[in-house]
Image (spheres, rainbow, N blue to C red):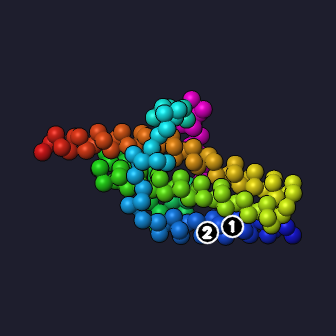
Amino acid sequence: MKLLLCALYLAALGVAAHFIGNALPRTWFHCDRFPWRSFPWERGGRIYRKIGVHRWKDHVPDMSKLCRDMVPKAVGARPTAKQLQTQLEENMVAEAVHWALVLLSLGVVWIWPGIGGGVVYFLSLWGNLPFVLIQRYNRPRLARLLERQISKQEAAR
Protein backbone atom coordinates (compact mmCIF):
# COMPACT_ATOMS: atom_id res chain seq x y z
CA MET A 1 0.00 0.00 0.00
CA LYS A 2 2.84 2.40 0.85
CA LEU A 3 4.48 1.64 -2.49
CA LEU A 4 1.24 2.55 -4.25
CA LEU A 5 0.97 5.80 -2.28
CA CYS A 6 4.57 6.66 -3.17
CA ALA A 7 3.89 5.93 -6.85
CA LEU A 8 0.76 8.10 -6.80
CA TYR A 9 2.68 10.89 -5.05
CA LEU A 10 5.48 10.77 -7.63
CA ALA A 11 2.98 10.65 -10.50
CA ALA A 12 1.15 13.69 -9.10
CA LEU A 13 4.49 15.51 -8.77
CA GLY A 14 5.31 14.72 -12.38
CA VAL A 15 1.99 16.01 -13.68
CA ALA A 16 2.20 19.15 -11.53
CA ALA A 17 5.81 19.71 -12.64
CA HIS A 18 4.71 19.78 -16.27
CA PHE A 19 2.14 22.51 -15.69
CA ILE A 20 4.34 24.51 -13.33
CA GLY A 21 7.28 24.26 -15.74
CA ASN A 22 5.10 25.60 -18.56
CA ALA A 23 3.87 28.44 -16.33
CA LEU A 24 7.28 29.62 -15.09
CA PRO A 25 8.26 33.01 -16.53
CA ARG A 26 11.21 32.53 -18.84
CA THR A 27 12.52 35.94 -17.79
CA TRP A 28 13.59 34.33 -14.50
CA PHE A 29 16.23 32.28 -16.30
CA HIS A 30 19.59 33.63 -17.51
CA CYS A 31 22.31 31.22 -18.65
CA ASP A 32 25.05 33.59 -17.50
CA ARG A 33 23.84 33.67 -13.88
CA PHE A 34 23.96 31.25 -10.96
CA PRO A 35 22.92 28.45 -10.91
CA TRP A 36 22.49 28.15 -14.66
CA ARG A 37 25.95 29.21 -15.82
CA SER A 38 28.60 26.56 -16.08
CA PHE A 39 30.74 26.13 -13.02
CA PRO A 40 34.51 26.14 -13.61
CA TRP A 41 34.74 22.41 -12.85
CA GLU A 42 32.22 21.71 -15.64
CA ARG A 43 34.67 23.18 -18.19
CA GLY A 44 31.92 24.52 -20.44
CA GLY A 45 30.07 21.18 -20.38
CA ARG A 46 33.11 19.12 -21.42
CA ILE A 47 33.09 17.19 -18.14
CA TYR A 48 29.76 15.67 -19.18
CA ARG A 49 31.21 14.52 -22.48
CA LYS A 50 33.95 12.74 -20.53
CA ILE A 51 31.32 10.80 -18.57
CA GLY A 52 29.52 9.89 -21.80
CA VAL A 53 26.37 12.04 -21.70
CA HIS A 54 26.63 12.58 -25.48
CA ARG A 55 26.29 8.82 -26.06
CA TRP A 56 23.01 8.26 -24.19
CA LYS A 57 21.27 11.65 -24.03
CA ASP A 58 19.20 11.03 -27.16
CA HIS A 59 17.94 7.69 -25.83
CA VAL A 60 16.08 8.92 -22.75
CA PRO A 61 12.36 9.72 -22.86
CA ASP A 62 11.46 13.11 -24.35
CA MET A 63 8.20 14.51 -22.96
CA SER A 64 8.05 17.10 -25.76
CA LYS A 65 7.17 14.24 -28.12
CA LEU A 66 4.14 13.38 -25.97
CA CYS A 67 3.04 16.84 -24.85
CA ARG A 68 2.45 19.16 -27.77
CA ASP A 69 2.47 22.22 -25.50
CA MET A 70 6.19 21.72 -24.88
CA VAL A 71 8.98 23.14 -27.03
CA PRO A 72 10.59 20.35 -29.11
CA LYS A 73 14.11 19.59 -27.95
CA ALA A 74 15.70 19.24 -31.38
CA VAL A 75 17.52 22.23 -32.83
CA GLY A 76 17.24 22.39 -36.62
CA ALA A 77 20.15 22.55 -39.02
CA ARG A 78 20.00 26.37 -39.24
CA PRO A 79 18.40 27.66 -36.06
CA THR A 80 17.69 31.34 -35.63
CA ALA A 81 18.86 33.32 -32.61
CA LYS A 82 15.25 33.39 -31.38
CA GLN A 83 14.97 29.58 -31.62
CA LEU A 84 18.26 29.14 -29.77
CA GLN A 85 17.19 31.58 -27.06
CA THR A 86 13.95 29.60 -26.64
CA GLN A 87 15.93 26.35 -26.40
CA LEU A 88 18.21 27.86 -23.76
CA GLU A 89 15.23 29.03 -21.70
CA GLU A 90 13.54 25.63 -21.96
CA ASN A 91 16.82 23.98 -21.00
CA MET A 92 17.03 26.01 -17.79
CA VAL A 93 13.37 25.42 -16.96
CA ALA A 94 13.84 21.67 -17.47
CA GLU A 95 16.80 21.63 -15.12
CA ALA A 96 14.87 23.60 -12.50
CA VAL A 97 11.91 21.23 -12.77
CA HIS A 98 14.09 18.13 -12.42
CA TRP A 99 15.89 19.58 -9.39
CA ALA A 100 12.51 20.41 -7.85
CA LEU A 101 11.39 16.83 -8.47
CA VAL A 102 14.55 15.54 -6.79
CA LEU A 103 13.82 17.64 -3.70
CA LEU A 104 10.07 17.08 -3.57
CA SER A 105 10.50 13.35 -4.10
CA LEU A 106 11.89 13.23 -0.58
CA GLY A 107 8.21 13.16 0.42
CA VAL A 108 8.23 9.43 -0.28
CA VAL A 109 10.39 8.95 2.81
CA TRP A 110 7.64 10.62 4.85
CA ILE A 111 4.98 8.42 3.17
CA TRP A 112 7.03 5.25 3.64
CA PRO A 113 9.59 5.70 6.42
CA GLY A 114 12.57 3.38 6.41
CA ILE A 115 14.24 1.36 3.70
CA GLY A 116 11.20 1.18 1.42
CA GLY A 117 10.88 4.96 1.11
CA GLY A 118 14.65 5.22 0.76
CA VAL A 119 14.64 2.81 -2.17
CA VAL A 120 11.75 4.64 -3.86
CA TYR A 121 13.55 7.98 -3.36
CA PHE A 122 16.76 6.52 -4.76
CA LEU A 123 14.87 5.36 -7.86
CA SER A 124 13.29 8.80 -8.27
CA LEU A 125 16.69 10.43 -7.86
CA TRP A 126 18.18 8.21 -10.54
CA GLY A 127 15.20 8.94 -12.75
CA ASN A 128 15.78 12.71 -12.60
CA LEU A 129 19.55 13.16 -12.41
CA PRO A 130 20.23 12.04 -16.00
CA PHE A 131 17.99 14.87 -17.21
CA VAL A 132 19.88 17.39 -15.07
CA LEU A 133 23.15 16.14 -16.57
CA ILE A 134 21.75 16.46 -20.10
CA GLN A 135 20.71 20.07 -19.45
CA ARG A 136 24.12 20.91 -17.96
CA TYR A 137 25.81 19.30 -20.98
CA ASN A 138 23.67 21.03 -23.61
CA ARG A 139 23.42 24.53 -22.14
CA PRO A 140 27.00 25.76 -22.77
CA ARG A 141 26.85 24.39 -26.31
CA LEU A 142 23.55 26.16 -26.98
CA ALA A 143 24.90 29.39 -25.46
CA ARG A 144 28.00 29.29 -27.70
CA LEU A 145 25.83 28.60 -30.74
CA LEU A 146 23.57 31.52 -29.81
CA GLU A 147 26.56 33.84 -29.43
CA ARG A 148 27.84 32.83 -32.89
CA GLN A 149 24.39 33.33 -34.41
CA ILE A 150 24.06 36.80 -32.88
CA SER A 151 27.56 37.71 -34.12
CA LYS A 152 26.65 36.57 -37.64
CA GLN A 153 23.46 38.63 -37.59
CA GLU A 154 25.30 41.71 -36.37
CA ALA A 155 28.01 41.28 -39.01
CA ALA A 156 25.34 41.02 -41.71
CA ARG A 157 23.93 44.44 -40.77
Q: From the image, tell me which residue sits under label 1.
A: 11
Residue 116: percent from left, percent from top: 86, 57
Q: Quadrant of residue 9?
A: bottom right
Which residue is pictured at 22% across the width and 40% down the height?
152
Which residue has dot 2 on it?
Answer: 15
For label 2, the SS is helix
Q: CA distance from mark 1 to mark 2?
A: 6 Å
Residue 7: x and y in percent read 76, 65
Residue drawn at x 81%, y 54% is 118
Under mark 2, the amino acid is Val
- The quadrant of the picture occupied by the N terminus is bottom right
Q: Is residue 65 visible?
A: no
Residue type at mark 1 is: Ala
Residue 51 in the magenta stretch? The answer is yes
Secondary structure under the numbered disc 1 in the rendered image: helix
Q: Residue 153 — which label?
A: none
**For residue 1, side relative to residue 108 (left or right):** right
